[in-house]
Image: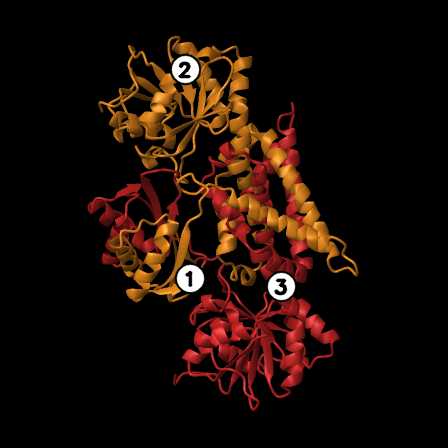
Chain colours: A orange, B red
Amino acid sequence: MSDRRLEGSVRIVGSGLLGASIGLGLTARGVDVIVDDASPSNARLAIDYGAGRAPRDDDAPALIVVCVPPDVTAQVVGAELAAHPDALVTDVASVKLAPLRELESAGADLSRYLGTHPMAGREIGGPAAARADLFLGRPWVLAGHDAISYRRAAAIEDMILDLGAVPVEMTVAQHDASVALVSHAPQVVSSLLAARLTDGDNAALALAGQGVRDVTRVAGSDPGLWLQILSANAVPVAAILRALRDDLDVVVDALERIGDERPDGARRAIVDALAAGNAGVARLPGKHGKDARYASLVVLIDDRPGQLARLFAEIGDLGVNLEDLRLEHSPGAPIGIVEVSVLPEAVAALERDLIERGWRIAG
Amino acid sequence: MSDRRLEGSVRIVGSGLLGASIGLGLTARGVDVIVDDASPSNARLAIDYGAGRAPRDDDAPALIVVCVPPDVTAQVVGAELAAHPDALVTDVASVKLAPLRELESAGADLSRYLGTHPMAGREIGGPAAARADLFLGRPWVLAGHDAISYRRAAAIEDMILDLGAVPVEMTVAQHDASVALVSHAPQVVSSLLAARLTDGDNAALALAGQGVRDVTRVAGSDPGLWLQILSANAVPVAAILRALRDDLDVVVDALERIGDERPDGARRAIVDALAAGNAGVARLPGKHGKDARYASLVVLIDDRPGQLARLFAEIGDLGVNLEDLRLEHSPGAPIGIVEVSVLPEAVAALERDLIERGWRIAG
C-alpha cells in the first residue's frame, strides 16, 4: 500500500465490468472507493464483490470516474462536474471526441475533465466479471484537450498507475483515429464477412478451418453496444472503411477481369493487395510491445485429457515461458496441433529437448 | 496394416507438404509409394523423410496423386493420364473447376480423373513440414464431375480413408463455391484490413488488442500462392466480395449520415449488419463438427514458466479435455488470461474444482 499514488476518495459512477474492476483494484490498494450506479442492484452487487462502499451525504471525492455506456457518458460526466465542483472527473468510454463536444456545447467546466480509455475488457460484462487486475500492463489512454493540462489531471494518471496499467497520452482526435483503426473498423469488417456465412449451406460451412474462425471471431459482439461505439466514432471509422472499400473495388475488378484474354494488371493488383496485407500485419507489436516476432514450434498431441498438461509441464520444466499458443481446430480429429511461441533465443533448445522427450515436432 | 483399403502402388507427383504427407501416411499403412518431383532434390528429401521410394521403369501405379501448385495442376494431371493409361489420377489442388476445364479442352481422358481437396495444411510448407497424420479427421473433398462415377473413383476414397480423413462428396462447382466462402474470401478480407494498418502510426498500433490480431492473422499468407488460388477461383470469390462490398457501402453510408439531423435508418442499418454477423459466425460448426458451442472459462495465470503447465495438469487431473484455448496478449503484463473451452456438461464442475484449487476464474 505504501507505494500508492492516489490520495483522497474516488467516486465511481457505473458499476459494470470496468467500473467494478477499477473499484476492486483501487480498494485493494487501500483507496476509499465510493460506488454509485443508476441501477441500485448493480451497485449493491459491485459492493458485495468488494468494489467499494455505498455513497454518503458527506462524500467529498477528489476524483470521479464515470463508467457508463458511451451514449450517456457526456450527460453523466456533466452531472458529476456540476454536483461536485471541487472534483476532477474522468470517464472510460471507448470514444473520446463526441462526449467532449457534447460537454462543450452543454457549457461544462472542462478544466476539471479529462477523458480516458483503458485498452482492456472482456467479452463478458457486468460487475460479476470484474477483476482487480483487469488493467495490469494494459495501455490506458489519457485523451488530452486544450481546457486542461495533463499536470492538472495528475490524479487520473495516479489512478492508472495504481491499477498497474500503462498511461498513454494522446489527443482526443488521435485516440479516436487510433481505435477506429485497431478496433472499430476491424469489428465492422469481421461482422460483414461473418454475415456472408449466412448464405453458405451446411456442407460449405463444414469445410471451415481456423482462418475463417479467426477472421470472424469478434463478429459475435453485441450489436447494441457497437452501434453506440461506431456512431460516436463514425467519421474516422467511415474514412478507414471507405479506403478499404476502394481497395476492395480494385480486387473485385481484378478478379472479374482475370479470366479475360488480356487481364492487364489484374494479377499485379491482387498481389499488391495481398502484399500490403503482409506489410500491415507485420506492423502489429508483439506481446511485449516490441515488433519482434516470436519463434514458434508446432507440436502434435493426442487429443486426450492430460496431453496438453504433459506438454506444458515439460516446457515449464525446461524453464521456457510461452509467449503465445494456438490450438488448431480439427473437426473430429483424435489429434491436436499446438503452436507454441517462445522468445527466438529459446526455440532451438526447446525443440531439441521436446524431441528428446519424444514429442512430435512439425516442420 | 490388415485394415488397409488401398491396393497396388500409388505414384505421388510433387513432394511438397501435401505430397510428402500423403506419402508418409500411405507408407506407414504399408502401401508401395512412388515419389516423383520436377525438383529431384525435393523428391530425394521427401524419400529421405520416408515418404516413399524413387520411380522405376517398371512402375505400374494403380493410383496417381498430383500434388503440385494450382496453376500447373491440369498440365501435370494431363501428362500423368497420358503416361499411365491404366491408372486412376487425382490431384489435391485447392480449386477444382479450373483444372477440370483445362483438362477438358486439352482432350484428356476424364473417365480416369477425379480431383480432390484435403482441408488440411499448414503455414509452413515443403517436405520437411510433412506429417503422416496431417489429414487425420480432416474433411477431404472428392470433387465429382459427369465423366466419372464416385464408384469408379473408389481407390481415391480408399486413400482418403487410409489417411484417416473424412471423404466429402461435392461437385466441382459446389467445392469451389464452398472454399470461396470459408477460405478464399476471408483471406482477401483479412489482407485488405491488414493493409489499412500500414496507414497507422506506431502509437495507434500499440493499442492493438486480440481482436485485430485475429482478424488479420491470415493476412500473413504468401501472395504468390494466393494469387494462383484466387485467380483460379475468381468468379465465386468475386461474387462473395461484391456482396460484401454492397453491405460495406450500406454501413459506410450509414456512418456518414449518422451525424445528420435526421439520419433516417442509419442506426438500423448498422445494427442489422452487426446482427447479420452474429448470425453468420454462429453457423460455424464446432471442433467436432456439431453446431454446439463450447462453454468456456477465463482463468488468470501469472506469466511465469510452468503456470500454464500447472493449469493444464490440473485440468488433466480432473479428466476434462480442452476443446479450445486462447492465451490473451497483454503488452508487458505480468499476468496472462487463458480462456479454456470445454464441453458444456463439464464446465460447472471444472470451474468449481479450479476455484477449489486456488485458480482465479473471471466472470
Name the residue rendered at 65%, 31% in the picture: B256
Give the residue type at disc 1.
His
- Looking at the image, can residue B49 be seen? yes
Quadrant of the image containing the N terminus of chain B:
bottom left
Q: Which residue is mark 2?
A: A151
- Given residues A329 and A56, the one toward you in this image is A329
A215 on left or right of A66: right
Residue A250 to residue A44: above or below: below
Q: Position of residue A145 (x, y in %)?
A: 50, 17
Extreme residue toward the bottom, this view? B58
Q: Which residue is mark 3?
A: B176
In space, the residues marked 1 and 2 are separated at their CA atoms by: 56 Å
Q: Which residue is mark 1?
A: B288
Give the residue type at disc 2.
Arg
In space, the residues marked 2 and 3 are separated at their CA atoms by: 60 Å
| Count of residue discs | 3
- As helix, strand or loop, the secondary structure at mark 1 comes to loop
Pair 1/2: label in front: 2
Pair 2/3: label in front: 2
Name the residue rendered at 52%, 37% in the picture: A182
